[in-house]
Amino acid sequence: GREMILWDGFCPTHMRITADKISVARLQFPNAVFLIHPEARKDCRDLCDGVLSTGQMIDFVRKSDRNEFVIATESGIIHALTKENPEKIFHLLTESLECPNMKKTTLDHLLAALEGRGGEEISVPEDVREKARVSLQAMLDLSN
């Protein structure tokens, strides 16, 4: 019953990925596997070897017999990849791939939420909760 203004949004972090940057990196790292997130532009996705979610990237690298990867997504994934695969080499496509929105929630914020302090309780109608639960469960099932 409310007027909605729909906006064809985008991820500003992934918009910093360009086809030119991928082409230059291909010359710089000719033996690397190029992995990119689905949020990136189609012309950039088309230039990469895999279009994967964060969890899919981690799983792909873990199972891969390849040793070198160029990662075209938010820089935070590099830590997880390196920690789990210390023998492999990772290159971030460009240093400007840090998402300020992902850095807003800290461990202290998470602890406060789990302890029930520092914020308002949010409730949603049961039908909305159930739809969200189904979506979250599907996402979790894919990560196994």
Image (cartoon, rainbow, N blue to C red):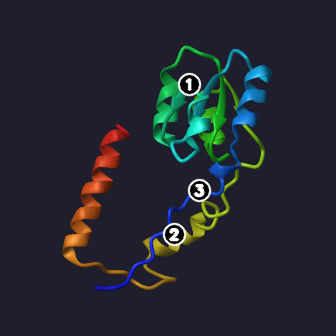
Residue situated in front as seen by the camera: 111 or 121? 121
Q: Which residue is mark 1?
A: 49
Q: Amino acid at mark 1?
A: Asp
Quick one: quadrant of the N terminus? Answer: bottom left
Identify whether 97 is placed above or below 86.
Answer: below
Residue situated in front as seen by the camera: 113 or 37? 37
Say few, some or many: other residues with alpha carbon within 10 Å of mark 2 (under 14 / 14 to 19 / 20 or more): few
* Residue under the point 51% across and 67% down: 110
Say few, some or many: other residues with alpha carbon within 10 Å of mark 1 (under 14 / 14 to 19 / 20 or more): few
Q: CA distance from mark 3 to mark 1?
A: 21 Å
* Residue under the point 21% across and 65% down: 130
Quadrant in which residue 83 is drawn: top right
Secondary element type, mark 3: loop
Q: Give the number of the mark in front: 2 or 1.
A: 1
Q: CA distance from mark 2 to mark 3?
A: 27 Å
Q: CA distance from mark 2 to mark 1?
A: 38 Å
Q: Do tag 2 and tag 3 residues touch (Cβ < 8 Å)?
A: no
Secondary element type, mark 2: helix
